[in-house]
Image (cartoon, rainbow, N blue to C red):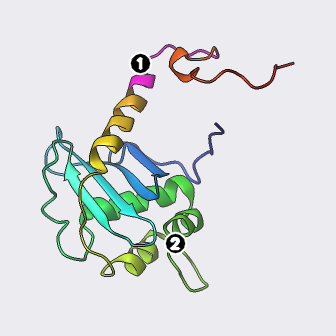
């Protein structure tokens, strides 16, 4: 899989994990009040249904009704830093008039058009985040990782 470099450098302390996957913008956002708590947040492409809960599946107090909580706003901001505003808007199917596209514009276009959804995405997103953390404990190497060798190569490398 090809890794796309970030659009701009970002700090990982507030949002250690963000991805555009499974038809959603999803990621892990650190709590502002408790250093041991993180929130798993997601916004579905097209419908803008959103979910935000702790890693223990407790719902976020701010993710109620039709407006995004601060964790989802933070997730959108970091996604724009990671992938670029145009790519995030295109992935989420947000139609924005010509002009400067940024995280605030994307969030404003989506906010109020959907309702808080289920937290069913929290477990797989958090699991992927933990798997990514496990890779940080491995020694640097250019050799293939055994767990990523599920499929045989389709061609020989010259």
The residue lying at 15 percent from left, 42 percent from top is 56
Q: Nearer the viewer, residue 86 or 126?
A: 126
Q: Which residue is mark 2?
A: 93
- Residue 13: x percent and y percent? 34, 42
The residue lying at 63 percent from left, 45 percent from top is 4
Element carrying mark 2: loop
| Above or below 131: residue 101 | below
10 Å crowding of disc 1: few (<14), some (14-19), many (20+): few
- Residue 81: x percent and y percent? 50, 56
Q: Earlier in the sequence, mark 2 or mark 1?
A: 2
Tell me the number on the disc at residue 61.
Answer: none
Q: Quadrant of the C terminus?
A: top right
Q: Nearer the viewer, residue 34 or 72?
A: 72
Left or right of 86 in this view: 125: left
Between disc 2 and disc 1, the foreground one is 2
Q: Which residue is mark 1?
A: 137
The residue lying at 42 percent from left, 31 percent from top is 132
Tell me if residue 137 is in the magenta stretch.
Answer: yes
- Residue 33: x percent and y percent? 14, 50
Left or right of 84 in this view: 70: left
Work out how far the residue at label 2 is from the one at label 1, CA to CA, in angstroms: 36 Å
The residue lying at 40 percent from left, 62 percent from top is 76
| Above or below 16: residue 42 | below
Q: Main secondary structure of the magenta part?
A: loop
> Residue reaching furthest right?
158
Please state the extent of the stretch shown in magenta in the rendering. Answer: 134-142
Element carrying mark 1: loop
10 Å crowding of disc 2: few (<14), some (14-19), many (20+): some
- Residue 79: x percent and y percent? 46, 57
Q: Quadrant of the N terminus?
A: top right
């Amino acid at each position: 899989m090809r890794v796309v470099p970030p659009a701009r450098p970002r700090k990982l302390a507030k949002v250690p994990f963000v991805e555009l996957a499974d038809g959603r913008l999803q990621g892990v956002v650190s709590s502002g009040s408790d250093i041991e708590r993180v929130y798993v947040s997601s916004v579905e492409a097209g419908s803008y249904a959103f979910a935000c809960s702790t890693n223990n599946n407790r719902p976020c107090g701010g993710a109620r009704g039709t407006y995004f909580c601060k964790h989802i706003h933070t997730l959108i901001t970091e996604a724009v830093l990671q992938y670029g505003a145009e790519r995030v808007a295109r992935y989420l199917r947000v139609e924005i008039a010509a002009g400067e596209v940024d995280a605030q514009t994307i969030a404003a276009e989506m906010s109020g058009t959907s309702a808080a959804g289920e937290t069913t995405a929290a477990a797989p997103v958090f699991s992927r985040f933990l798997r990514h953390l496990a890779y940080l404990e491995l020694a640097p190497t250019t050799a293939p990782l055994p767990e990523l060798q599920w499929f045989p190569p389709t061609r020989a490398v010259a």
